[in-house]
Structure formats: C-alpha cells, structure tokens
Image (spheres, helix red, strand yellow):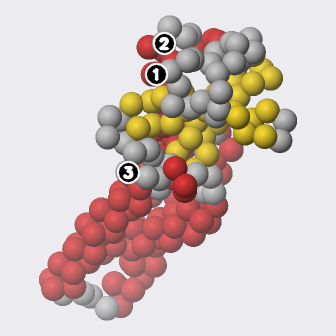
Amino acid sequence: MDVLPYILFLFPISSFVTGVIIYAFVRKKYIAPILIFSLFLIIQFTFFNYTFFQMVCIYTFLAFSGSFTAEIVMKKYDPGKRLKKVLGIVMAGGVLALCAVMLLSKPYQSWVMEHKVKAHLKEMAYDESEIESIDTTYEHKRNTSRTKPVIAEVVFINDPEHTYRYIELRQKNKIKQMCEYKSGNVMKSEYTEERPHMIKNCY
C-alpha cells in the first residue's frame, strides 16, 4: 500500500491551494490552517500513527503560506466579484475531488477492509485480544465482478505460524475466509486441520 504520493504530493499541494482559495474567499489567514490541521489530525488517527504528526504540522504551515501568499497578491490586485465566484467554485470542486480521491484511494479501502474483517471475526466469536495482526494488500487480479481487490491477512496469537486470508464478495458485501494459503513456496487451497482457524466453507 503505497501512500507516499499522497503524503509527498497530493496533501502538500492541496494544503497550499486550500490556503490560497479560502483566504481569497473569506479574507482571514487563520481559517485554512485550522481547517487543514483538524482534517489531517483526523486522517492521522484514522490511517497513520503519531509519526505522521510532523506532516500535519507541515501541511498546516503550507496552508498558512497559501493564505499569506493570497493576502499579499490580493492587496496588490483586488479581485472582483467574478473572480471570487470562480474561486468559490474551484474550492468546492477541489474539496469534492479530494474527498473522491480519499474514498477511492487504496489506504481508505484498506482501512475499511480491516474494520470489516474485525467485525466479521467478532461475529465469529473472536475477541480482539486473540488477533495478533491484520495486514491488508491490494491484489488487482481480485478486482472482479465477484470480489473486491483488497485482501486482509490475519495472524492469530495462538497460531502465529499461519496467515489466514480474507476477501470481500462484491455483490453480497460479505467477508469470507479464503481457502488458499501458502505452504512452503506452494499455494494450496484444500482444507487441513493443521490450520486451527481454517473453516471448511471457505471461499
């Protein structure tokens, strides 16, 4: 799951542009930095960990820089109502585009899949304390009319040697344990009692 393009390009550019547009619209430098700080703080707690906070601060600074730049430019060139209207449309479009990118992005899909698998395991009478880890991978070949492309790989605390793969059925929006597993360098799919958390009606 490669999030570097978002962290290094999309988020910084969006922060600066947001600073420019919001200042042009409301003429207050502090609105955009507060908005960006709040937004990326939520993203930090949702998708990342505490190390992302330094990027939150950078994005906040970029938003302030955008507002400051807009202030200097607008003092020299006072825009008319038409330009403000255009900027408002651009801002609304940018927000919608950013939301669309986030919702369609692999990090968001992975986050959703992780929580769906947790809910599924809870329905199967598992407790969170029994789960050692849940990692997600994006497999393009799984993106079919029947299944979604994000795979969750679960390791249980009492069975750390085995990894159990879960997939979501597209039409039913249902999580299913996959039959396939890796044995040495070979992928197998038959049921075996050597894997204590494997179910017989796997996918």
Which residue shows up at 21% across the image and 81% down it? 86
Q: Amino acid at mark 3?
A: Ser
Viewer-nearest residue: 187 or 120 = 187
The tag on residue 120 is: 1
Q: Is residue 99 visible?
A: yes
Q: Which residue is mark 2?
A: 124
Number of numbered tags placed on the structure image: 3
Q: Is residue 53 visible?
A: no
- The reply to whether the C-beta atoms of the residues labelled 2 and 3 are less than 8 Å apart is no
Q: Determine which quarter of the picture holds residue 21.
A: bottom left
Left or right of residue 137: residue 15: left
Q: Amino acid at mark 1?
A: His
The local secondary structure at tag 3 comes to loop
Q: Is residue 134 above or below residue 58?
A: above
Q: Which residue is mark 3?
A: 145
Q: Amino acid at mark 2?
A: Met
- The reply to whether the C-beta atoms of the residues labelled 1 and 2 are less than 8 Å apart is yes
Q: Determine which quarter of the picture holds residue 161.
A: top right
